[in-house]
Image: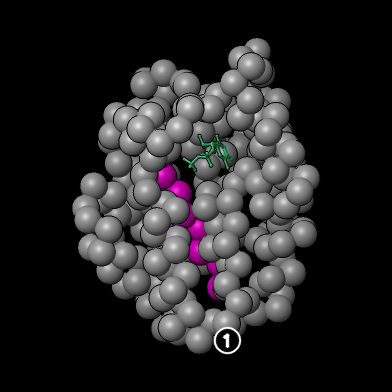
Amino acid sequence: MQGIFISMEGPDGSGKSTQIELLKSYLESKGYDEIIITREPGGTVISEAIRGIILNKDYSEMGYMTEALLYASARAQLVSEVIKPALEADKAVISDRFVDSSAVYQGMARGLGVDVAYQINSYAIQGIMPQLTIHMDLPAKVGISRKKEQAELDRMELETLEFHEKVAEGYRTLAKLAPERIRTIDATMGIEDIHGKIVSYVEDILARA
Ligand code: TYD
């Protein structure tokens, strides 16, 4: 089996984690015996520590550039410690968010610019990009109300509805810029229907591999 890297993207509360678990089982059925699941920001001891700083709701004074660089730092450690070695060993990697989150949240919603976001991250990702990115498309309102039901909101989730609307719209724009890699799915559909769509996109890339 060849290494495969899939990222899951979408607004907060779009149901990525449920789909990642289903996708993991599917990839196992395809013969990948070790599937690495990781999340951003996080996935290593250092990246989880950085996550604690980024999402701490007491740090309301955090500047947008500081925020962007912290996400990139957490990512740099995750790529070198987990993702790169896994792909070199021909494993499957599924990441709950990757560099597109920075393009959308920091580049578009915060207004730093998509080019700046990718530029900052070019050092962090060392040329590694997902072969497939699943974009879970969902109205911002729906995502945030799902989050509110689950737990206390973090610094990003506490942002205004306007911010989350920019995120949801930002993903739609980004998906149009990279239609070969980023596949949009209506995340208001049922769990099994969404999984079926994801499987069809994964089959496409496995057939090409
Ligand atoms: P998390 O609790 O993992 O959110 P979710 O369950 O919705 O994925 O928190 C990650 C938050 O950080 C989320 O609000 C998106 C945001 N984020 C960025 O702003 N930029 C980034 O590069 C990444 C990876 C996440």
Q: Crowding near pointer 1: few (<14 within 10 Å), some, many (20+)? A: few
Between 125 and 12, the one lying in front of the other is: 12
Q: Position of residue 118 (x, y in %)?
A: 61, 43
Between 44 and 110, the one lying in front of the other is: 44
Assess whether residue 89 is covered by the magenta stretch. Answer: no
Left or right of 108? Residue 38 is right
Q: In this picture, which residue range is highlighted in magenta?
A: 3-11
Q: Position of residue 30 (x, y in %)?
A: 45, 84
Between 188 and 169, the one lying in front of the other is: 188
Left or right of 203? Residue 118 is right
**Vertical side of 54 occupied by 184: above or below:** below
Three-letter code, disc 1: Met
Looking at the image, which residue is at 63% across and 43% down? 41
Between 176 and 65, the one lying in front of the other is: 65
Q: Position of residue 108 (x, y in %)?
A: 48, 31
Snapshot quadrant of residue 129: bottom right
Looking at the image, which residue is at 67% across and 37% down? 51
Mark 1, secondary structure of its residue? loop
Where does label 1 land, which residue?
Answer: 1
What predominant SS class does the magenta segment belong to? strand
Q: Quadrant of the N terminus?
A: bottom right
